Amino acid sequence: MKSKRTLNRFRTEWDLETQRMKSTGEAESGGDDVSAAGERAPENSGAESRDHLTGLLTLESFLDAVRGRVLQARRHGRLTGVLYVGLNDVKRVNDTFGMQFGDILIRQAATRLRSAVREADVLARVGGVNFAVALEPFDTVDDALIVADRFLDLLSETFNLFELADHPVGISANVGVSLYPNHARSSADLIRCAAMALGEAEQQGANRVEVFDRERGEETKARMELEWMLRRAIDKREFALWFQPEIDLRTGAIIQREALLRWRHPQLGQIAPARFVPIAEETGLIVPLGNWVIREACLEAWKWQHTGDAGIGVAVNVSALQLAKPNFAGTVQVVLRETGLSGELLELELTESALMANFEKSVLELSRLRDYGISVVIDDFGVGYSSLSYLKELPVSGVKLDRSFLRDIEGNRHTLPLLKSMVSLAHVLNMRVTAEGVETQAQLDAIRTIGVDTAQGYLLGMPAPMGGEKASSAASS
Ligand code: C2E
Ligand code: MG
Ligand code: MG
């Protein structure tokens, strides 16, 4: 399905914007490379380079072609745009039938695309499975969207790869659209915006058209910058661990401390885990980072045993990706051996969704962790599946009630009775219950009355560096 609704919304917004630009003359001032190119249509200026497989222009020559279209559009007060097409499933064809059939498919796709555009539109192969079209100047956004829709229709028709005639192949595709002057003024930026829109379309699912969205583009850019900084941060040792105490509500003693990852960027200062942990997870960086956290936390907890805090354990947050690694429990055990910390002093915190992502694997890894004396608790309990029934299948020793329950206690009269039954059920299953995010005396009193075992929160102790913040000097592990 194509995202017609998005397109309709976009058409209206876009037409308004175009009118505004035309009336203010904004569309008349062209992009940098247009002025640099003068009034000459650049695609006629040099030898064109062609892709050997399809005979289409390569990216390099395509840049010139887009520049030419921008120049024309600007001169005549019209619009132009780039459609960026991505074929899906070519890898599947390569893997199933062989590379040569992937090549045939790409050639046939090129022919179909060629048949869907006008003589003056320029088609290029800009990557392995990516094509792009520079449209001849046009007047309404529909002109571009119609072509995009036609592409998807043509590409979704069955392909016959000659000898494989009995095995007709079906693929899907996506198209990203960018427009001059609305999204970008230079050819390189127009292509970049169209490629970003293609990425968006692909995320929405197969056979979708997406038009570049400036706000989303800014977000993507900011995320990419953060990802880039994150990659460097590991090498530059910008991470540190802070620790927050977890208190036994019967004795008031600290039973353990939760290790919380902190990132201090030299220019941007502290960056919150809520901002960087999701990116570290998406990029897989959480695995080396998380390994560093486990090792550093164990080293720190080992020190406590020898400096007057004997018996105090450490809790470490573990992401789903880490748990999914082969032999996760084994790698943790190696850290214990190397740091000298006893397994009983290490607790791992996993969310419900991380545990449920691959239930069998979770059972296996958790059982092995338990054999090493390491306990596992469910973090942010109550926001996900919230089902204690599957918990009895998993060797978990406790749950940490999500912070949102604590916030609700005073405002919602149903929250405390709900928490009370969760606590009873957890106790039946032999699990410890921890309350997170205790900020007020009233919250503390309330959770005491319903039998919560341990608690953590600003009221009881802020997250803080141990013995002054120190740099992640052990990051080499
Ligand atoms: P979490 O594991 O649920 O950690 C508790 C979060 O609540 C921490 O936020 C802590 O600073 C905050 N907190 C503690 N007491 C209070 C309170 O009384 N009120 C309020 N409003 N907040 C309180 P932080 O450090 O920003 O971490 C956020 C999340 O980032 C963590 O939630 C955890 O999911 C993730 N995270 C932190 N460190 C790591 C790590 O080393 N690895 C992984 N995978 N995730 C981590
Ligand atoms: Mg936690
Ligand atoms: Mg939590």
Image (cartoon, grey):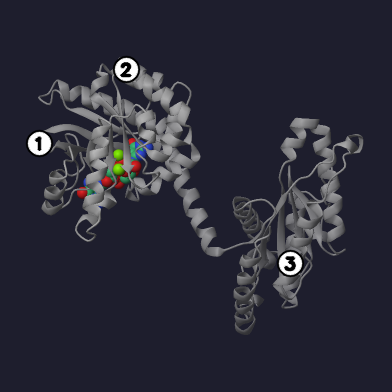
Which comes sooner in the sequence, label 3 or label 2?
3
Q: Is residue 200 left or right of residue 119?
A: left
Q: Residue at x 79, y 57 (%)?
A: 153
Three-letter residue code for mark 2: Tyr
Three-letter residue code for mark 3: Ala
**Which residue is nearer to you in this view: 437 or 55?**
437
Q: Quadrant of residue 194?
A: bottom right
Q: Which residue is mark 3?
A: 144
Observer able to see residue 344: yes
Q: Where in the image, quadrant-wise, is ligand 1 located?
A: top left
Q: Secondary structure at mark 3?
A: helix
Q: Where residue 21 sits in the image (x, y, percent)?
A: 61, 79
Q: Where residue 117 sits in the image (x, y, percent)?
A: 83, 61
Which comes sooner in the sequence, label 3 or label 1?
3
Q: Residue at x 85, y 40 (%)?
A: 104
Q: Residues within 10 Å of mark 3 (few under 14, many from 20)?
A: many
Q: CA distance from mark 3 to mark 1?
A: 69 Å
Q: Which residue is mark 1?
A: 250
3 or 1: mark nearer the eye: 1
Q: Where residue 26 sits in the image (x, y, percent)?
A: 61, 77
Q: Quadrant of residue 113?
A: bottom right
Q: Where residue 269 sits in the image (x, y, percent)?
A: 31, 49
Three-letter residue code for mark 1: Arg
Do the residues under discs 3 and 1 have CB atoms within 8 angstroms?
Answer: no
